[in-house]
Amino acid sequence: MDDALFFSEQHHSVREMVREFARDEVAPVAKQFDESAKFPWENIRKMGELGLLGVPWPEELGGAGLDLLSYMIVIHELAKVDASHGLTISAHTTLGTSPIMNFGTVEQQQRYVPFLASGRVMGGFGLTEPEAGSDAGGTKTTAVRKGDRYILNGTKRFITHGGVGEIFICTAVTDPSQGTKGISSFILTKPTNDPEGAKAAGVGHEPSLPAMKGFRAGKKEDKLGWRASDTCELIMEDVEVPVENRIGEEGRGFVNFMKTLDAGRIGIAALSLGIAEGAFEQALRYASERKQFGKAIAEFQGIAFQLADMATEIEAGKLMMYHAAWLSQNKKPYGKEAAMAKLFCSELAMRATIKAVQIHGGYGYTKDYPVERMMRDAKICEIGEGTSEIQRLVISRQLLRELKD
């Protein structure tokens, strides 16, 4: 991809900074955290210090004050080395913080965003439920208003940072008679479930945030990939949430979280692209060094053509992802392009990592090389933030709307 199409000198500086951090701080510990499935608190602190947990948010709210393209560069570059670190930034920023920035009041932004943008605490997005996955409108969590408070009851599933996080945007039904127009969203707070890890790193817990009684983390998921990323249930049992913690008007929750997911798809595309490119780089290096029949296996057409296909698809993915980000940044319609980028890049991540394992041969099936981890990390990209089937649904519906118009 011609960097001049999208990138300024500042973008190049951001990319080099993140590449250096990924090489020096993430690569040496990625295998360790994948195996232990522990949250990398020390690197969370370092990412906060570098401004990576608040890239697109204003400096006056604790952010780095950079643009959306810079944010996508950060996710893309980190995911080349470790998807869990890239996903931590993506989920924290797009899902855990952007609803407050995009739909919250000035008071809500000033109260919560500085904690999130600086990385002092982790944030998350409570949307998915045991019976509401692809059918996000099937939310069962309820919010019953009583005076100046809402009483929330329900369970959220597969929530990134559900355990370690302290600030969450959660959806709940406020008017069952209105279908998706009866869903609202709220800001909820709880203590991290890893106070020792947070204390050791010096980030992760904010004493001034109220612990809402009845709001807690449930089961931690034991995942195939993204193992250094925290994924837990969120449980709400008669949680009292002040009215001022509602985001926007009643009934706006569904519309707002659909907009959030549109933006999130670009982030997952960037993450997927990073995994694919990281696997390609590993495969290219290995194929140029591994010798069979007296020469490097990269010289054999069977391997060379696989590398050529991977490189070509990665270039296409870059153009799709950064184009969708550019459209969003310039306030142009981008829903279809985001879905296309997410669909193409997530499926590319799976194809590229499978090829990378194949090129490594027997070694690729061992934990001696990172490609097996990359393959495990790639699969969820076809599922999270809208499955490939949902992306095809979004794209086809938009195509039909355009035809009618």
Image (cartoon, rainbow, N blue to C red):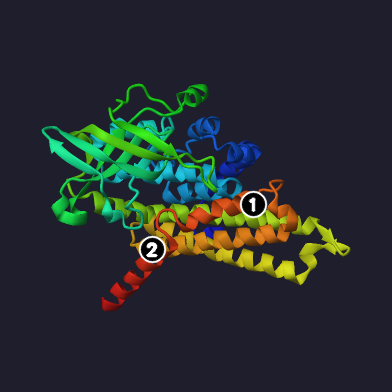
Indicate which disc residue 134 carries. Answer: none
Q: Please, is residue 236 above or below residue 180 in the view?
A: above
Relative to residue 231, is residue 186 drawn left or right? left
According to the picture, the residue beneath numbered tag 1 turns out to be: 372
- Residue contact between numbered discs 2 and 1, judged by CB atoms under 8 Å: no
Q: Quadrant of the N terminus?
A: bottom right
Query: Quick one: label 2 or label 1, which is nearer the N terminus?
Result: 1
Q: CA distance from mark 2 to mark 1?
A: 27 Å
Residue at 41 percent of width and 29 percent of height? 192
Q: Is residue 210 above or below residue 90?
A: above
Question: Which residue in the structure is indicated by mark 2?
Answer: 390
Q: Going by the picture, which residue comes out furthest to the left? A: 147
- Residue 374 image point, x, y percent: 60, 51
| Whether residue 78 is visible | yes
What residue sits 57% from the left and 41% below the top? 17
- For the C terminus, the image quarter is bottom left
Element assignment for label 1: helix
Which residue occupies the extreme bottom position in the image?
A: 403
Residue name at image x 51 percent, y 52 percent: 271
In the rendered image, residue 86, in percent from the top left (x then y), is placed at 51, 45
Q: 306 or 111, which lies in front?
A: 306
* Residue 44 place in picture, x, y as percent: 51, 33
Against 22, residue 403 (above or below) is below
What amino acid is at disc 1? Glu
Figure check: 291 above or below 309: above
Whether residue 62 can be seen here = no
Extreme right residue here?
294
Callout 2: SS: helix
Seen in the image, is 172 located left or right of residue 361?
left
Structural crowding at the residue carrying mark 1, measured as other residues with C-alpha within 10 Å and reported as few (<14), some (14–19) or many (≥20):
many
Instruction: Indicate the amino acid at tag 2.
Output: Ile
| Residue 190 on image: x %, y % | 34, 30
